[in-house]
Amino acid sequence: MIKKILIANRGEIACRVIKTARKMNIKTVAVYSDADKNALHVEMADEAVYIGESVAAKSYLVMDKILDAIQSTGADAVHPGYGFLSENKNFANKLEDLGIAFIGPNVRAIEIMGDKITSKELAAKAGVSTVPGHMGLIEDAEEAVTISNQVGYPVMIKASAGGGGKGMRIAWNDEEAREGFQSSKNEAANAFGDDRIFIEKFIVEPRHIEIQVLGDKHGNIIYLGERECSIQRRNQKVIEEAPSPFLDEKTRKAMGAESVALARAVDYDSAGTVEFIVDKDQNFFFLEMNTRLQVEHPVTELITGVDLVEQMIRSADGQKLNIQQKDVKLNGWAMESRIYAEDPYRNFLPSIGRLSKYSPPAEGQTDSGAIVRNDTGVYEGGEISMYYDPMIAKLCTWGTDRMEAIKAMRSALDTFEIQGVGHNIPFLATVMEHDRFERGALTTAYIADEFPDGFEGAELTSNNARKIASICAQMHQKSETRNANGSGVLKGHERVIANEYTVEVGTTVFSLSIKDTNGSCIVTSRDATDRAAVELGISHAWVPGQSLVRSLVDNNALNFTVVPIAEGYAVQYRGADVNVKIRSTRTASLASIMPEKIEPDTSQFLLCPMPGTVTAILVAEGDEVEDGQALATVEAMKMENTLRAEKKSTIMKINVVPGDSLAVDEIIMEFGK
């Protein structure tokens, strides 16, 4: 049996592998770079080895450093996680030469399926339906345009190696094909060290559905149902679920059978994923096979009860699968929300910094019978670095059916506290509340369809605005009472605490009064549209200083997070970010006549929207540019971002050169009027 596993990865997936290894009484070795010296996976592992600089190309992607760590620690197996060297045939070959077990498939499977062009050719031979396209390599942008016209727009320009949304662009015309080819080529080279590009037809209104396969070294291969991964942004999955709300049993079996046939064609012997694009009529087409553990594997584990990491380890150890196809049962429904360090209000640009607050919801079974799971590689006080993927955690929920899983996810997101970096929890919460998502009417264009102008936050319903106003007013009163009691005033000179307030929630104003009733309170409120006052019973255990508010409104749970601001709280609830201002009646009347602060005009500058490195300046001083024209590219967290002009103007001054590292809002260039 394998005795010691070196994990050639970092972050949440390294922590995930360590958990299963512990369960199997297998020792673990972590590797780490400068940026990760205090990382959670380093703390969790039995041993840890330093492998170099923060940049992945000088640490996690350097095979010799990983091999040296294996030799120095006596590890007899390697789990590569996903990304980095996980689908590198040369790495797997070197491990085989050293007699080290690779916890992944055989080298031939990696080689064939790791190349999207070769894998499509094999899939066609194996009887698997494939997307029309040009499978030859593309040499330059002009050839990309020619082939795109032959295939027919829209087309998908894709890197032959790798995955995870890197090196992928959709082009609808010649200009986008030229630009997309170069961006895909650059991203692929940086992420995978392989800049080969191919082109295929982009299917309109597609769904992204994938099949989990599992094999051993004795010829046994099964599939464990499917995952729906259609909620994507920039070709990167954001929310996944299992099973799919779209497939019927007949289509599920057909996709599973083709996936097993494809896996059998390369003697597949580990966990792997066959990805399909599915049209509105349930016709499905092979996209690619990922010869590794997928980011979204927890949802499959939650509905099947199969620990995929354990099965990978046992397969690498030469053991036979102890599961047959007839044993696979899909139980209930599971959701996964990827929590990213990014600003959803600024086009989801990456965010870096220290996690001054990190408090995820409790894992395990809830009072309602649902299950919460949170796979993470961070901790409170830790750093989110600019060098790696911005994922903070994978929040998963399980319920007896899809609606129960959604409700559990809503509740879990309500109580997930993160401060110090921007994060996408408001966006995830908004999707979970959305009628179209609830109905399962999904396509890979869902985000573009529903948020065409970007994410601007959700609107509180009038009912929820009233509830939050009532809770915050009672919180304010509680804070004021504590301050008065601790002021040390003489008896008879105590401060009188108000019980009537004007509360502003966004643009809605409530007049309310609070009446204590033995530990809870009755809040009576009225806004401009109310014909009669509304009474709510409020109770909570909140104390000043807490950022999570767990409350009951008429005995129904309502949880949200707060940050103190002048005169109240910044509240985050179900995708809405609102300022709640609580004032006495007199203060409110004065506030209504105060002048509003005017924001500075930055329209004459191109500001860096996130911390990153300038990779290209696409204009020169004196150039006249048009609305939407590309001005510069900035790379951050392994993604290349193109910055564009927002209006017609003239470039007056360029302040940076390629290679410069910039902070948020640094001036890249200045425009003339």
Image (cartoon, rainbow, N blue to C red):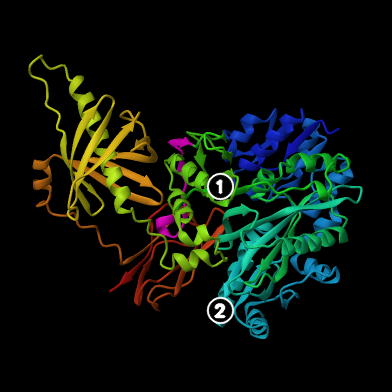
Circle 2/circle 1 CB separation < 8 Å: no
Q: Quadrant of residue 249?
A: bottom right
Residue 172: which numbered mark, if any? 2
Q: Which residues are magenta?
A: 344-359
Split into 4 quadrants, where in the image is the C terminus? bottom left
Three-letter residue code for mark 2 = Trp
Q: Is residue 238 above or below residue 617?
A: above
Q: Say which element carries label 2.
A: loop
Q: Give how far across and how far down residue 289 sits, in percent.
A: 75, 60
Visible residue check, residue 257: yes
Of the pair 97 and 26, the residue shown nearer to us:
26
Q: CA distance from mark 2 to mark 1?
A: 37 Å
Q: Quadrant of residue 540?
A: top left
Q: Nearer the viewer, residue 578 or 467?
A: 467
The disc labelled 1 sits on which kind of residue?
A: Ala
> In the rendered image, which residue does mark 1 sit on?
405
